[in-house]
Amino acid sequence: MVWAVLIGVLVVVLLYILWQMDLLDKANKRLKQQMAAREQELLKLQQAAYQLAEQQKNVLLQQLQQVPAATVLSPVELKMCQLLVQTLPLLVKECCSKAITPQQVMKSQTQRLPDGAHLALMMKRHNRLTTLWQNNTMMSHLQLCTVAVALAQEETQAKAG
C-alpha cells in the first residue's frame, strides 16, 4: 500500500515536471521568435542608417567641392575633412556591426595614410571639432563631419571677406 502511494506521488511529480518542461519549451520557442524578429528589425535599421550615411556623405562631398582652393584650412586638413566625410558609411557600418567607436574606425583608416596623424591635430586645433571628437559616438561623428565641412566653408568666407 505504501509503495503504491509512493509510486503514485512519483508519477504526479513526474507529470508536473513534464508539464513545466513543456511550458518552458513553449516560452523558449516564443522568445526565439521574438529575438529573430528583433534581429530582422535591427538589420533593417542598420541598413537604413548605412543608406542615410551614404546620402549624408554625398551631400557633404558636394559641399566640399564648393570650397575654393584659397581656403584657410591647410591642404592636409582639407584632406582629413574629405576622409571624415568619405568614411561616413564605413564608420556607420562598423559601429553598427561591431562594438567599436568612431575613433577606432578612423584610427584604422588614418594608419594607412602618410599624413594620418594630422586628423588628431586638426581635432585639437579647431575648438568646434574637439568636443564632437571627444564625445566619440556615432551621432557626434556625423555632427563632426557636418561641422568640419561648415568650418571649411566658413573659413573660406572669412578669408574672402
Image (cartoon, rainbow, N blue to C red):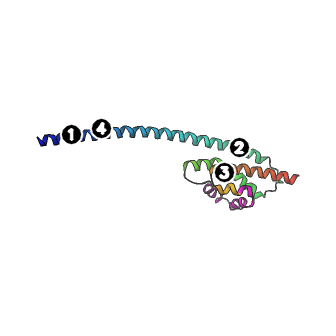
Can you tell which mark lies on residue 157? none
For numbered disc 3, what is the local secondary structure?
A: helix
Query: Which quarter of the image is occupied by the N terminus?
Result: top left
Out of 11 and 89, give the one closest to the viewer: 11
Question: Quick one: label 3 or label 4, which is nearer the N terminus?
Answer: 4
Labels 2 & 3 near each other (Cβ < 8 A): no
Q: Residue at x 66, y 51 (%)?
A: 141
For numbered disc 4, what is the local secondary structure?
A: helix
Would you say the magenta stretch is mainly helix, strand or loop?
A: helix
Labels 2 & 4 near each other (Cβ < 8 A): no
The amino acid on which the numbered mark 4 sits, given as a three-letter code, is: Trp
Determine which residue is flagged by label 1: 11
For numbered disc 1, what is the local secondary structure?
A: helix
Determine which residue is flagged by label 3: 140
Q: Which residues are magenta?
A: 103-129
Determine which residue is flagged by label 2: 58
48 sits to left or right of 73 = left
Labels 1 & 3 near each other (Cβ < 8 A): no
Question: Quick one: label 1 or label 3, which is nearer the N terminus?
Answer: 1
The amino acid on which the numbered mark 1 sits, given as a three-letter code, is: Val
Q: Residue pushed farthest right?
A: 161
Question: Quick one: label 2 or label 3, which is nearer the N terminus?
Answer: 2
Residues packed near mark 2 inside 10 Å, few (<14), some (14 to 19) or many (20 plus): some
Can you tell which mark lies on residue 19? 4
Residues packed near mark 3 inside 10 Å, few (<14), some (14 to 19) or many (20 plus): some
User: Residues under labels 2 and 1: Cα distance?
Assistant: 70 Å
